[in-house]
Image (cartoon, rainbow, N blue to C red):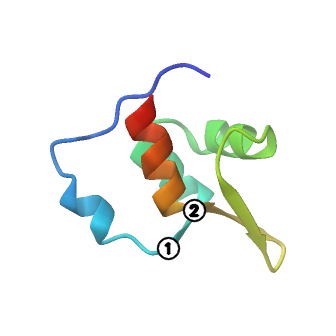
């Protein structure tokens, strides 16, 4: 996976997010396309939680992943 830069200009924005994010919203935060977000989720490269037939990204783990990149 290519290195993605975390938007550190507004770190408080991460605090206002829900515990789980829809893949398109997580992709937008990462600066990638919706389809790329789903590709990464299905490849196991995003911290996901399937619920009720939908896939959600775990916000806290996404933030940790992005900060480590």
* Residue occupying the point 37% across, 70% down: 17
For label 2, the SS is strand
Q: Residue furthest bottom?
A: 52
Closer-to-camera residue (68/7): 68
Quarter of the image holding residue 22?
bottom right
Q: Which residue is mark 2?
A: 58
Badge 2 density bin: few <14, some 14–19, many ≥20, Cα 10 Å: some
> 33 or 42: nearer the eye?
42
Up-down relation of residue 17 to residue 48 (above or below): below
| Residue 58: percent from left, percent from top | 57, 62
Q: Residue furthest left?
A: 9
Q: Is residue 37 visible to us here? A: yes
Q: Is residue 44 left or right of residue 37?
A: right
Q: Residue 20: x and y, percent?
A: 55, 70
Residues tagged 1 and 2 counted as in contact (Cβ below 8 A): yes
Q: Position of residue 1 (x, y in %)?
A: 62, 22
The residue nearer to you, when weighing 43 against 33, is 43
Q: How far apart are labels 1 and 2 at the CA level?
A: 6 Å
Q: From the viewer's perspective, tell me whether residue 7 is left or right of residue 55.
A: left
Q: Is residue 10 left or right of residue 52?
A: left
Residue that carries the numbered disc 1 in the rendered image: 19
């Amino acid at each position: 996976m290519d290195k993605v830069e975390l938007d550190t200009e507004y770190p408080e924005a991460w605090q206002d997010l829900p515990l789980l994010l829809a893949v398109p919203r997580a992709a937008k935060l990462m600066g990638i396309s919706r389809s790329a977000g789903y590709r990464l989720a299905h490849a196991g490269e995003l911290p996901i939680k399937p619920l009720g037939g939908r896939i959600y990204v775990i916000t806290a783990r996404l933030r940790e992943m992005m900060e480590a990149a």
